Image (spheres, rainbow, N blue to C red):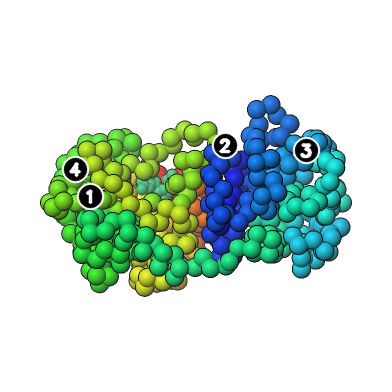
Amino acid sequence: QILILDFGSQYTQLIARRVRELNVYCEIHPYNNVPEITPDIKGIILSGSPCSVRDEGSPDLDLDALRGKLPILGVCYGSQLLAQKYGGEVLPSEIREYGRANLDHIDLHYDLLKEMTHGSQVWMSHGDTIKTLPVGFDVIASTTSVKVAAFKIQNEETYGIQFHPEVTHSLEGKNLLRNFVVGICGCAQDWTSDMFIDNTVAELKAKIGSDKVVMGLSGGVDSSVAATLIHRAIGENLTCVFVDNGLLRKNEYEEVLESYKTLGLNVIGVDAKQRFYVALAGISDPETKRKAIGRVFIEVFDDEAHKIDGVKWLGQGTIYPDVIESVSVKGPSATIKSHHNVGGLPDFMKLSVVEPLNTLFKDEVREVGRALEIPETIIGRHPFPGPGLAIRILGDITEEKVKTLQEVDAIFIQGLKNHGLYDQVWQAGAILLPIQSVGVMGDERTYERVVALRAVGSVDGMTADWIHLPYEFLGKMSNEIINRVKGVNRVVYDISSKPPATIEWE
Ligand code: XMP
């Protein structure tokens, strides 16, 4: 595997993605918590950073402990650190170098640059530049404005590059990473879904043995894939719990329960609608709603778990980005929404946690899901928030409002599917607004609800943009919703991006 040491760059996860795309396993660790260098680590990549090596107290690393022992590739900050530490000079760039550049001079004899082309386009994003290199460091590529675009240290496989090979605008970036990871480090390209499944199932068998596991399912891709893997390993000793919190999409509870049964999972469906409605009665504040839902979910789940004699483990669908975030070098960011409050581990349950997907990115989870033959209706499903429709009903929640929103949402989602738009959208849904507006139906004046439709494109939910759905489609949806859903006389479309808006309205 490849070890990626993170100095806090926004691109670190992208480096990992690219390495994984080469079918090579890699892990990200913070620069200040370097794991033991075991023989299965074949090379190290030092990431970029928002900091400058010139700043006092900027992230630092004992490079002597690593240099010469195994191949190293410093990217941006990583390369500047290598240069500065051994006597080179790093200075602020006269102009901030940001965007496309071309490697006008490139020495293709070096293994790192093999099969790349003269003038290769790369992506720069840095405020500092390496003015002079230490003795024993050779320049191996330059652009017109950046002399030291890439260097190699003589007699060892240590390289530095000023540009970002992980960004797709570096057109031959993947080639360079392959040269490093496969050519120089000698990693085997055997990290595939099938291998992941075989290894994980074997590990789960060894870890869990004949113990019992309980797991909450949400209908989403992560928990479904995690449950299927655990089921492969331990069969009937896995009990899944799928809770109807009364805040799911129309018919979702029945449909999802059915697909889980088809997958052979041992699922207990719990209709807890009324418990949630009672707990939510009169609550309008979004965070209070989330907390109430989280609390009731844990109570319901705990009741079910206690019915399983001798259960020892709690299965969870945690994925890699959640894990990396928690060791990130960036300071803790302010809580905007307490997202992960649903389905967390209640302390009093005293179960050990098993998280078979905690090394995978979302798209890898999908691939593993496909290899496990989980139906596309689950794999390709849009993300759906744990608190469900509760955070799409602005203001307090009643059963009647949920029913209205379920009808609107069902028309919209089915419409997206019928018009071939569903897979072009990352997430979509409808929001019930806490206002009424005047309308006219026949000869009558109406005073009814307004709903908003939202459809966004995104990669990870961190940023998002509204989708330019065709006007004809929007018009059709508006007509259908107003004609078919009683109590709604107006439909609006949300054209805000995130930031500054968020995907959900609460
Ligand atoms: P926002 O609204 O913050 O949402 O742009 C980003 C992504 O997170 C989902 N989301 C939640 N998921 N519990 C969840 O499990 C929550 O409380 C929650 N709030 C937002 C949202 O649907 C989107 O995919």
Q: How far across and down, in percent of the image, does residue 92 sit? A: 79, 35
Q: How far across and down, in percent of the image, does residue 64 sit? A: 69, 40
Q: Which numbered disc flags the more N-terminal residue, 1 or 4?
A: 4
Q: How far across and down, in percent of the image, does residue 42 sit? A: 60, 56
Q: Residue 86 carries which label?
A: 3
Query: Residue at horizontal 33%, vertical 38%?
Result: 286
Query: Residue at horizontal 84%, vertical 60%?
Result: 107
Query: Residue at horizontal 46%, vertical 41%?
Result: 326
Please give the residue where the numbered disc 4 appears in the rendered image.
Answer: 299
Q: How far across and down, in percent of the image, does residue 388 sit? A: 31, 50
Quadrant showing the N terminus: bottom right
Q: Residue 418 sits in which quadrant?
A: bottom left
- Residue 86: in sight, yes or no? yes
Tell me how far mark 4 sits from mark 3, CA to CA: 58 Å
- Which residue type does callout 3 highlight? Tyr
Q: How crowded is mark 2: few (under 14 residues within 10 Å), some or many (20 or more)?
A: some
Residue placed most toward the observer, 477 or 138 = 138
Q: Left or right of 329: which side holds 279?
A: left
Q: Residue 32 carries which label?
A: 2
Please give the residue where the numbered disc 1 appears in the rendered image.
Answer: 312
Tell me how far mark 3 sits from mark 2, CA to CA: 20 Å
Tell me how far mark 1 sits from mark 4, CA to CA: 18 Å
Asked if the residue at label 2 sits under 8 Å from ligand 1, the reply is no
